[in-house]
Image: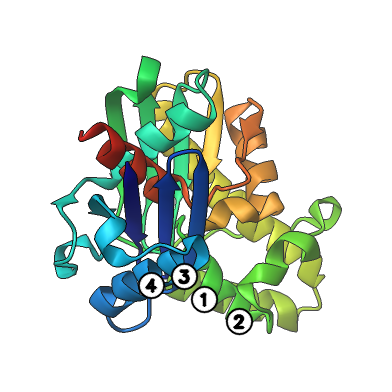
Amino acid sequence: MIVIGIDIGSVAAKGYLINYDSHHRALIPTGWSPREAGQTIIERLLAASGLASDQVERIYVTGYGRVAFDQADKTVTEIKCHARGIAELYSEVRTIIDIGGQDSKVIRIGEQGRVLDFAMNDKCAAGTGRFLQVMATALGLDVSELGDAEDPGQMQTISSMCTVFAESEIIGSLARGNPKGGIIAGLHQSVGKRVAAMARRMGIKEQVAFTGGVAINPGVKRALEEEIGAKIMVPEVCQYTGALGAALLALENG
């Protein structure tokens, strides 16, 4: 059976194609149209696999833009897809921390990715990729540069988690001559504190996996590990776990 899982996020659209024993994946910026992003993902996956569209038996879609994409056979919640994807990668994981562009989530799972409970911050940008994007711009950096640019040894505390106030705080800290690397470390720590507080309310069960676009940032991983007091695993396909989960659910017809 040949299936495709698509995760259309607020920042990036990801796709995962499973063709018997071979897998293909693709990632593009979502842009202004989730529908077009989903279609482009399918085209790229088909091109990479050498398959025709009529060979794909099932397409499942998840993510922020799933309601706008009408070419899927089924829409599935992000919670269920991340749980299924991580269960495939790390069967021992019991807590998932997912930080994407628009929200952050903590998911507790049982065996085979069964969702036991979850919490989500989707009401403000605090503790999300969007928060880090705005702060990176204020620092004159690309968001992808933050992880390598931090200096925890010179950490500067960022007291505000409101995006507008935190941006002003950073500009003021730079004006006072504080080291940029220390400011970035403080930013990562503030995100870690925010998300760790949500995780503690859920009850952290080891092992812990970190997914989403922000999981690429080693500074946020460091901060989360310090705040929750546990080692965190980051899968190589951390941006694709939702798409992988959707593809697996399509394969299982879940």
Q: Secondary structure at mark 2?
A: helix
Q: Nearer the viewer, residue 118 or 216?
A: 216
Dot 3 or dot 2: first in sequence order is 3
Drawn side of residue 38 relative to residue 96, left or right: left
Task: Say which label, 4 or 2, has the lower sequence index.
Answer: 4
- Circle 1/circle 2 CB separation < 8 Å: yes
Disc 1 target residue: 134
Q: Amino acid at mark 2?
A: Ala
Cβ atoms at labels 1 and 3 below 8 Å apart: no
Residue name at image x 64 percent, y 44 percent:
221
Q: Which mark is residue 47?
A: 3
At 35% from the left and 63% from the top, the residue drawn is 9
Residue receiving disc 4 = 43
Between marks 1 and 3, how big is the CA–CA gap? 35 Å
- In this rendering, is residue 250 above or below 228? below
Dot 1: few (<14), some (14–19), or many (≥20) neighbours within 10 Å? Answer: some
* Corner quadrant of residue 13: bottom left
* Residue 205 visible to an observer of this rendering: yes
Instruction: Where is residue 215? Give x, y as percent.
Output: 58, 50
Disc 2 designates what residue? 138
